[in-house]
Amino acid sequence: MTSPNAYKPGYTVPLKKSEAEGLGVKDAQNLVIMVMVCVSKDNEISLNLKGPVLFNSENMSAIQCIVDREDYPSHFVIKGAAQATKNPLAAPSPLLK
């Protein structure tokens, strides 16, 4: 999981009243928005901007919600397969041979 704002500046989640009540939100400053990071077999890295997870840091509760926006896809590529293979961290460790 990662913060979406590092890759999609201005990312926001419209929180429904029922979701806020379920999280026990008293102060919006206690909400942390995270998104799932997916790594494919060919090392493409993408984010699920459609289904963020909202954490209430005050009481440690969380929910996953669905954001119905065209500009927030469930497969938002941040690093393509060709780019990922150039990353030395993506290469197998020589210690694992």
Image (cartoon, rainbow, N blue to C red):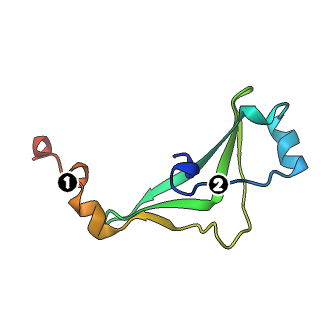
**Could you say whether the residue bearing mark 2 is in a helix, strand or loop?**
loop
Name the residue located 25 percent from the left edge and 53 percent from the top edge: 90
Amino acid at dot 2: Gly
Describe residue 9's horizontal placement relative to residue 89 as left or right.
Answer: right
Of labels 2 and 1, earlier in sequence is: 2
Does residue 8 sit above or below 22 in this rendering?
A: below
Residue 74 coordinates in the image, percent (x, y):
58, 66
Name the residue located 65 percent from the left edge and 48 percent from the top edge: 53
Residue 8 coordinates in the image, percent (x, y):
56, 57
The one of 70 and 19 positioned closer to us in this rendering: 70
Does residue 22 sit above or below 71 in this rendering?
A: above
How many labels were placed on the picture?
Answer: 2
Tell me where residue 68 sits by quadrant: bottom right
Name the residue located 79 percent from the left edge and 36 percent from the top edge: 28
Residue at the extreme bottom of the image, as rendered: 70
Q: Name the residue under label 2.
A: 10
Kindly report the distance in space between the C-alpha atoms of the residues bearing marks 2 and 1: 32 Å
Task: Check contact, mark 2 vs mark 1: CB within 8 A.
Answer: no
Characterize the local packing of mark 2: few (<14), some (14-19) or many (20 or more) Cα atoms within 10 angstroms: few
Q: Which of marks 2 and 1 is in front?
A: 2
Amino acid at dot 1: Ala
Tell me where residue 71 sits by quadrant: bottom right
Residue 26 coordinates in the image, percent (x, y):
85, 31
Residue 88 coordinates in the image, percent (x, y):
20, 51
Name the residue located 51 percent from the left edge and 59 percent from the top edge: 47
Describe residue 41's horizontal placement relative to residue 59 as left or right.
Answer: left
Does residue 2 sit above or below 48 in this rendering?
A: above
Characterize the local packing of mark 1: few (<14), some (14-19) or many (20 or more) Cα atoms within 10 angstroms: few
Q: Name the residue under label 1.
A: 91
**Could you say whether the residue bearing mark 1 is in a helix, strand or loop?**
loop
The one of 5 and 93 positioned closer to us in this rendering: 5
Residue at the extreme front of the image, as rendered: 9
